[in-house]
Amino acid sequence: MKKKFDVMGMTCAACEAHVTKSVKNVDGVLDCQVNLLSENMEVNYDESKISSEDIIQAVRKGGYDARLQDEEIHQDMRTSIEKRNAKKDEELRKQFKDLILSFLFMIPLFYLSMGSMMHWPGIPSIFLGHENMMIFALTEILLLIPIVFIHRKRFIGGFQSLLHGAPNMDSLIAIGSSASIVYSLYSVYMMAYHMGRFNLEAAHDYHMNLYFESAAMILTLIGLGKYFEARSKKRTSDAINALVELAPENAVVLRNGEETVVSIEDININDHIVVKSGESIAVDGRIIEGHASVDESMITGESIPVDKKEGDLVIGSTINKSGRIVVETLKTNDQSTLSQIIALVEEAGNSKAPIARMADVISGYFVPVVIAIAIVTCITWMMLGESFHFALTMAISVLVISCPCALGLATPTAIMVGTGRAAKLGLLVKDAVALETLSKIDTIVFDKTGTLTRGTPHVSDVEIYDERFLSYAYSLESHSSHPLAEAIVHYHDEELFNVNEYAEVPGGGITGIINDVMVIGGNKKMMESHGILVHEEKDYSSEGKTVIYFGIDGKYAGLFALQDELKEEVSDVIVELKNRHIQSLMLTGDNDRTAKALASKLNIDYKAEVLPADKEKVISSLQDEGHIVAMVGDGINDAPALMKAHVGVSFTSGLDIAIESADLVLMKNDMIDLVNALDLSHATMTNIKENLFWALFYNAICIPVACGVFYPLWGWKLSPMLGALAMSFSSVFVVSNALRLRWFKVKKESVKRNEHVINTDVSVIDKKSLGKKDKTMNKENCDKIVKIEGMMCEKCVKHVSNALNAIEHVEAHVSLENNEAYLQVFNHTVTDEMIKNAIEEAGYEFKGICINHKYDQSDYDKVIIIEGMMCKMCEKHVNKALNKLDGVEADVSLFEGKAYVKLQSVVDDEVLKKAIEDEDYKVLSIEKA
């Protein structure tokens, strides 16, 4: 069970470390995250072993106090944050009041103390002269007492922590101030002792050793620094407060036909909310009446209003710019998108980055070491012959200058401001770990569909080889929810047939029974697995298109070529990533040629034919190679890969899933924001390192000065009062430096892009007549000619035709007149023996077979003998490769293993050879025709 607690009394990184240690030592606590900046902690514990009260007691035993946060179960996010802000405001007012009271007593104390020595004007005579030394001392004590009372918590907390063996900042302040006070009180008693014996000279010596004003100054200046620090810390949560202010407090609900104003907390799911022009939409829902122009800039950052109509989803806290709508509630206020964003930003701001561990380790040892240095300093100066009050002054300076508060604030302030700025830019960062890891990314893996592309493919080309193709394909694809299926269904309105035994093959395609025949749709591998040989008039894959092939009753029926346009900003993003020395990799389930065409446009590496289940393996392999990997996907099918990556990046589509699986959500759905997130991450980490450097460098310089290391050489000496002032403002400096992130400027602005208009021009090649083989095959265009005896009538022709067409990769036309069969054979796996057996099994006599020499060698200039062509696609590849050459016209014969070439200009044989061998075929010889 996870619960949040408010922790009271923490003042520095040492406090944070001690509270963490105290809670983690409790049996049953699984994890504990303490945040100094927010003054809270999140504890994950086994409720069967311990209760929340046990955790609170552990904190109290450590010298601090704690209480459960947001104990009201039904308290919504807005109320919770408003209460927290009110509490901070109240504490800030109290700090200011205490500060004013401290100055009211400290100023006269300081003026009295310093003025009497420096002969400042306005000092009453009652405080001057040897005879008034006791009046002077007692007055200082009276002025000091209210200041000590105001800052009593520093003494109580400081000494309690010291007794618990975990000294903190308050311990340093308490020891330093107490030393000044105790030594001054000792001096007062010694003054009284010597004055009673009329030894005024000795009494005067002790009179000069009063340090009441030092103690008062230390406490007051610490209070001043803490007040400015608290003010600065309050500004770090401005982003969350701004988000909270977006939500309306009330809404108009339709109940029993009447409009009723209710609090936003009282809205239930399925309530109907009336939103008029100029009003904020109360919660997430769907428009059931009317239409409007909605300003979603506070959520997405997009300044141009979006037109919404019936059935469209709307987001809570967005503004209806025009029109009246009725919205059906889909989420209550505490489940809304805005509440999720606020929770996410707050959680990220309170989380701890790995770099903070260094500060935690240092803080654990820092205060005890400082106390030891102060003791050694005091003893050393006394051994060197200096007076006790000189040695004590040096020791006190060491104590007050060495506060680790700046060290503890270095990381959380930058994280909170950085994640808040990210939210304003439309970047939701899940936690500090993700923010830090983003700065180390060297490889980004992109899912293709919906990430690099728009995710709305459209049909660009159709090839038809069976008159049933369109209606059967439409019927089959109507059962699938895949984007490619939707594009096919939207392409053409065909008669819808019943589909039985519908099935989906992951990474392959779909199958079903229509009118008692098997219909298959999918990629080339899917077709090959069912023994269907496919072909296409154009090489669509080389154009970056995805091809879906269809087979009907075991025969090739046609194809759809689909195109998904690249997002406009993607090319810029890839260039920006390369400029930042980040490698990009595209993952897609498309075949290699399609993927290569798209990757070449982007100049990006790619992996093709990757199944959804295998994306996680690709991420793992990159991580095994030592890469720091980010994965960018839609957050649904890519969820395993998003979780596996060091940083998962998703979009607002399916926000709930995206938040669960991704570490970074791009609210504007604009890929350019990925670059901005990387830049913000680098800026935040740079800010943290600056803060840590300042905190450590400050102590490295100031502690030796406070010890008096440079006193013998140059007379440099640090008074406790200056030390207190410097220490206080070191924390203010760190917080102020972190606040600079509020003005972080993106280098690449997201711009409103025109909605893409899908090109409706579709290239259709209708060759369904090819399916009627008796009309298309003849002696001139066939591959092989078979001699047959025994055919007597058209029934005989049909028997032979059926027998031959039943052979895989064969199309045949039978001529009764010539006693011949003309065959198109699409693959070398079809042997003459197979053809002979088919004819003889049909009851006819096989008389011989020969290859049809379609091309007259005398019509050409050269003949190329080629090895390695196995099918019609091989023939097509070679034919295309040769005809792409300038001055070349070629015809290729698969079964002759030859290419016949006409030359319109001089073309070297090596050029012809290279064109063929680039397609992975071997040239045996090139001869003149």
Image (spheres, helix red, strand yellow):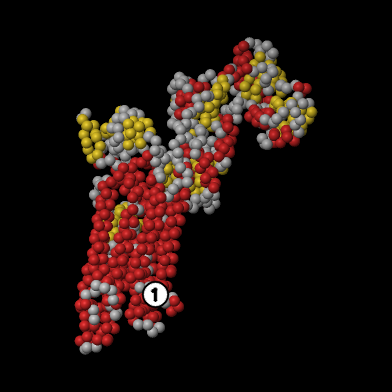
Q: Which residue lies furthest to the right in this view?
A: 928
Please give left or right for residue 228 compared with residue 565 in the image: left
In the image, is 927 to the left or to the right of 876?
right
Q: Which amino acid does label 1 sit on?
A: Lys
* Residue name at image x 33 percent, y 80 percent: 389
User: In percent of the image, x 67 and y 30: which residue is there?
Assistant: 884
What element does badge 1 sit on?
A: loop
Residue 348 left/right relative to 96: right
Coordinates of residue 88 in the picture (x, y in percent): 27, 55
Q: Is residue 897 above or below residue 709?
A: above
Q: Residue drawn 24% across and 70% down?
A: 108
Whether residue 884 is situated above or below residue 409 in the rendered picture: above
User: 12 and 912: which one is in front?
Assistant: 12
Name the outermost residue toward the front.
Answer: 121
Question: Which corner quadrant of the image does residue 554 belong to?
Answer: top right
- Residue highlighted by disc 1: 717
Quadrant for the C terminus, please. Answer: top right
Estimate the x, y position of residue 655 in percent, counting from the top left.
Answer: 38, 40
Residue at 55% x, 39% y: name it.
602
Q: Which of 160 and 42 lies nearest the eye of the viewer?
A: 160
Count residues near mark 1 (Cα–Cα under 10 Å), then give few for <14, some for 14-19, many for 20+: some
Q: Can see residue 729?
A: yes
In-front residue for pair 815/143: 143
Locate residue 3, reporting x and y percent.
30, 53
Residue 163 visible: no
Above or below for 238 versus 283: below
User: Looking at this view, is 841 or 425 the one in front?
Assistant: 425
Left or right, residue 907 beside residue 718: right
